[in-house]
Image (cartoon, rainbow, N blue to C red):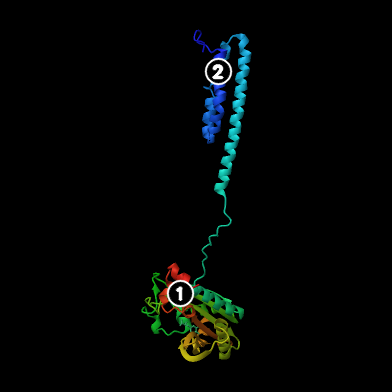
Amino acid sequence: MDPTTNLPTHMTMQSDLDALKSEAPSRVAAAASLDELADVEAEVVGKRSPIAEGRRGLGALPEDERGEAGRAINEGATELGALIAERRRLLEAAAHRAALAGDAVDVTLPGRAPNRGSTHIIQQVMDEVVDIFVAMGYTVATGPEAETEFYNFTALNFPYAHPTRLESDTLYLDYGDTPEEILLRTHTSPMQARYMEENEPPVYLVVPGRVYRADPLDPTHSPVFHQIEGLAVDTDITFGDLKGALEHFAIEFLGTDARVKFIPHYFPFTEPSAEMHVWHGDGWMELIGCGMVHPAVFEAVGYDPDEVTGFAFGMGADRLAMARHGITDMRHLFDPDIRNLEQHQ
Ligand code: DAH
């Protein structure tokens, strides 16, 4: 300022500019971030900077000094602007590098293995049993778990007074007024009747499914368990065919050294009836209920017992899974604890 005119003089302008040019480079260089640099830029070349003030003061200078003063200001502004631009370029590059480094994937770290599920051991048994029969040409069908008393018992030649029809053995559903009692099927055998009603012979059928009984859960019982039903009906099926098919199954499922025996038994829907037992190292285990389809069952479904014969069989999948995995308490099969499930895969 000229103390007499209170206006900037060429001399004061030049010295302000010189001061700015000597101190600004270190301030620009010290700006550690793009934000800090923006602040420095405002102070050095912004609206209230000595540069801007100098420009505003040019008009007050004597005419012969204006040109030189203006050039000096512009030169200073250009120099400082270039310094700031260079610093900005460096800071931007550093920020970009930091962002890339933050995103980097270290391909040398060990991967995180995904948690793989597996089918339940009961399902595995059912799938394997079904596959063995499918390989022999059998078809697969499934049926309703809520079943009528007719298909579950009557069509299968259960007498009306048969004790398993009682509520102490069978879980009945309350569907109000229905022509038939509705129950939770106690076995997969009702699908024999349902399938034959809908299909002409020959029949080669397996039926995997869930079944229910009025048993409390304990080490050897469960109110829900699983069966695989089988049915073969043709013009001249014999008990020899039954033995051949089930022995073949045992060898496929248990291995070539599997030993089986058939002992007489009773089921209302087969005559004669048998149980197939298998040797499993320390004793015989009952594996399959079976027999020749009773003529009364053929009649119930509209087949002519003089035209066709057949065999049927049923086995429990839960017991097979327990034997295979050395499980002695049935409740472990239905325990949803993941640690328990992971033990047996
Ligand atoms: N349904 C019988 C049960 O649950 C098992 C069974 C036995 C099925 C003999 C059959 C068979 O098809 O022929 O105990």
**Residue 284 locus on image (x, y percent):** 47, 88
Q: Which residue is drawn at 56% across and 75% down?
A: 140
Residue 275, image x, y percentages: 49, 88
Q: Which mark is residue 147?
A: 1
Location of residue 46 (image quadrant)? top right
Query: Local crowd at mark 2 within 10 Å, few (<14), some, or many (≥20)?
Result: few
Q: Which residue lies furthest to the top in this view?
A: 4
Query: Mark 2 or mark 1: which is in front?
Result: 2
Q: Disc 2 designates what residue?
A: 15
- Closer to the N terminus: mark 2 or mark 1? 2
- Secondary element at image label 2: helix
- Helix, strand or loop at label 1? It is strand
Residue 217 is marked as: none
- State whether residue 341 is above or below residue 112: below
Q: Is residue 82 above or below residue 308?
A: above
- The x and y percentages for residue 178 are 42, 72
Question: In percent of the image, x 63 and y 18: which residue is there?
Answer: 71
The amino acid beneath tag 2 is Ser
Q: Nearer the viewer, residue 19 or 266?
A: 19
State the separation of the CA atoms marked 2 and 1. 105 Å
- In front of the other: 286 or 327: 327
